[in-house]
Amino acid sequence: APHSPAQLRRNFSTALCVAEGCVACLVDQSAVNMPGMVVFGRRWGIASDDLVFPGAFELFVRIIWWIGTLILYTLHKGSFDCSGGGVLHSYLVGLLVLLALIILSLCAIVYVSAQGTIMNPGPRRSIPALVYLRALLYIPELVWACLGAMWVSDDSQGCDPATVGAVIAAVVASWVILLFTVLGVLFVFDPLGDPRPQPPAIEQLGVRDLQSSEGSQFLFTARSLATKVWESRLRLLCCCLPQDESHRAAFSSIAQLVSGFFSDTDLVPSDIAAGLALLHQEQDKMEQCRDPDDVVIHSPSSPIGEDFEMELEKAAHCMQFAAAAYGWPLYIYSNLFTAPCKLSGDCCRSQTAEYDIVGGDHLGCHFSSILHSTGLQYRDFIHVSFHNQIYEIPFFVALDHKREAVLVAVRGTLSLKDVLTDLSAECENLPVEGVSGACYAHKGMSQAAGYIYKKLVNDGILNQAFSIAPEYKLVITGHSLGAGTSSLLAVLLRNSFPTLQCYSFSPPGGLMSKALADYSKDFVVSVVLGKDLVPRLSIPNMEDLKKRILKMVSNCNKPKYRILLQGCWYELFGGDPDDFPTEMDNRREEELSQPLLGEESLIIRHSSSYQSLASEDSPAHTPTILSCCMSCFSQARYRAEWSSEMAFRSILINPRMLTDHMPDAVLHALRSLTSDRSFSLCPSSTTNSHQNVI
C-alpha cells in the first residue's frame, strides 16, 4: 500500500548512514525530531515554533478589540435604550467573554511556541492541543459574528449610530479574521501530508541495507506522489500557457527535478529562512577572516599580455547588446523619464526597413528600444526575432562596425516560457567534434542553442551577414538565460568559426560538463557581478546549501523567532556577525564536518544529485568557463579580477544575491569599471579591505 512522504520520513529517518555502502544501524524513533507540525491527522507546512509571530499579531488585534468592546460596554453601563438593546447587551457580554478566552489561548500558543529550538520540539509538545482549543473557539466566534450581523440588519433601529458602527466593525473584524484564517490554512496545507496506513515496523536486524526492496517501493511511491503534486502546481501557475505536448513534457521534467530535491528533508519554509539567516552571518564571519585570494593576472581565453582594460571595454560593449536584447521593458526601467517619450512615436510608426522581424513585436516597441540602446541603424540589422516559445528564445543578428564583428545577441529570461526553459535543468547530450570526455549540457538551454543554431546556419543568416562584411569576426553575447544559450551556441559554432568569441554575462551554474567547460575556456569569457546567485545555482551547490542549512539549524540552540528577528536586524542594519550566534555554545568548529544525528534525522536519503559532487563529469562540477569577477563596494565603486571556477563552488547568501544578477546592474558595473580605470584595476582585495564588499 502507498504511504505518505511524512510517514516515509518517520520510517527512514530511524536509520543513520555510517559507511559508504549505505549500511545503517537502528535508532530509536522517539529520539527523532520532526519540525513539521502534525495536527488533525496530517503533517502541515509549518512547525510548532512558527506560531509566535502570527499568534502575537492576532493577540495584539484581539487585545485592542477587547479593550474597545469593554469601553463601549462601560460607557453605556450595560444599558442600551433601543429596540434591540437586550440582544445587544447579550452580544457584547458574550463577545467580551469569547475574546478573553481567545486571548488566553493565544497567550498560551505564543508562549509555548517560543520554547525549545528547531531541533528540540519537546517543550512544544502541547502545541497540538492548544491548536485544537483555538480551532474550537472559531465555532462560537462564527456564531457570534452571525448574531451581530443579524442585530445590525434587524434590531439596530433607534440605537446610537456610534454603537451600531462599533458592532458593525466587530462583525467585519470577525469575518476578516475568519477569512485570513482560511487563507492561512490553505497556504500551509501540505498535499503530501495526507495520512496513509503505517508502514511495517523495521525488523531488529542490527544492520540493514537502506536500499531494500521495501524501502525502494516506499521511496518510489513518495517521489511519484510528490512529482504529481508539483506537476499540478506548475500547470496551475502556467494556466495561461497552451497545454501542448512540449509544455506537458517541460512540466513533468521540472516536477521531477523539484520534487527530487525537496523530498529528502522534513524542513518547513521557516526553517530554511532561519538557516539562510544563520548561514549568511557565518559566511560573513568566514569572509572577514579569510586570506585574500590569489588573482589570476591573465585570462586563459585571451593571449598572455593582452591589455586587461581592453578586455573590460569589450565586455562593456557586448553587455550593451545583451541588455538591448531585453527590448522595451528593460529600456524603460533603465530610463524611466526619457524612454517613454523616445518610444512613444516609434512604437506605432510603420517601418519599411530591410530587417526581418519574426513574431512578438507588432508595434515595433522592442526593435525601437534596441535601436536606441545600441546606437545602430536599421540597415545594420541582419535578422531580428522576437519569437518566444519554450526552448525558443528571441535573438538578433547585427553588424557591429565599431568592433568589426557580426554580433549575435540572445535575450535572457523575460517571460513565463523562458522560466520553463530555465527550469528544464536535466542533462542532455551535446556531442562536439574534437572534444574528448562526456559532453552534455543543461537541457533547456541546449535546445534553445540548437534552435538558434538552425536559424543561423540552415536559414543562411550568418552567410548573409558575412557576405556583407566578410572580414568581420563572429561575436556571441547574452545575459542569464541568454548567457547560457550563447555559450552553448558558441560551442556548436566553434569548429565553423575558429575566431569566434563569446561574452557571457551572469551565466547559470551547472550549464555544461567539465569536458565542454574546459573546451570553451579558449573562446568564452564570463562576467559575474558580486554575490550573484545564478552563476552559483547548480544542483550540487543547492544540495550543498541544503546540507549547510541542516547543519546550522541542527547546531543552533536559539529559538527560531530569535534567529529570524536577529537575521532581519542584521540584513537591514548590519552589525558584527560575531554578535549573532550560529552554532551551539562550546561546539568545536571541526565537529561541523562530521555527520550529526540531528541533521540526519532531517534527511531520509542522500540524493543522487548530491552524490554527483564526486563525479568528474557532473555538469556543475565545473562552472561554465573561467570568469571575470567584479566586486562592488559601498560607494558604487568596483574592481575587476580574473577568477577561477573554484569561486563558484558554493552559494553565497547576501541581500544582493538577486540584484547583482540584474542586467542593468551588470551594465552599470562594467561602465563604471571602464570609466574609472584607476580604481578598477586594483591588484588584490587587500587594497580596499577597509571598504564594505557587496
Image (cartoon, helix red, strand yellow):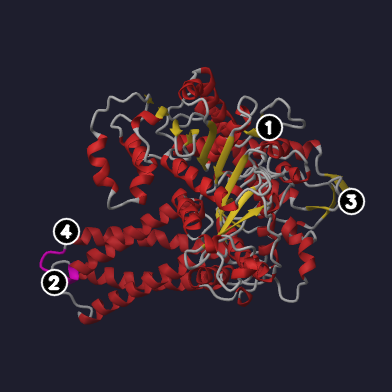
Task: Say which of marks 4 and 3 sits in front.
Answer: 3
- Kindly report the distance in space between the C-alpha atoms of the residues bearing marks 4 and 1: 73 Å
Give the answer, above or below, for where 576 lies relative to 470: below
User: Which residues fall within the magenta stretch?
Assistant: 156-164
- Kindly report the distance in space between the C-alpha atoms of the residues bearing marks 4 and 2: 15 Å
Type of the residue with mark 2: Asp
Report the residue that reaches farthest toward the right: 206
Type of the residue with mark 3: Gly
Q: Answer yes or no: do the residues labelled 3 and 2 have beta carbons within 8 Å?
A: no
Looking at the rendered structure, which numbered label has been put on residue 154? 4
Q: Earlier in the sequence, mark 4 or mark 2?
A: 4
Mark 1 sits on what residue?
440
Which image quarter holds the N terminus?
Answer: top right
Type of the residue with mark 4: Asp
Q: Position of residue 446 (x, y in %)?
A: 59, 31
Task: Say which of marks 3 and 1 sits in front.
Answer: 1
Give the answer, above or below, for where 69 lies relative to 233: below
Task: Say which of marks 1 and 2 sits in front.
Answer: 1
Mark 2 sits on what residue?
160
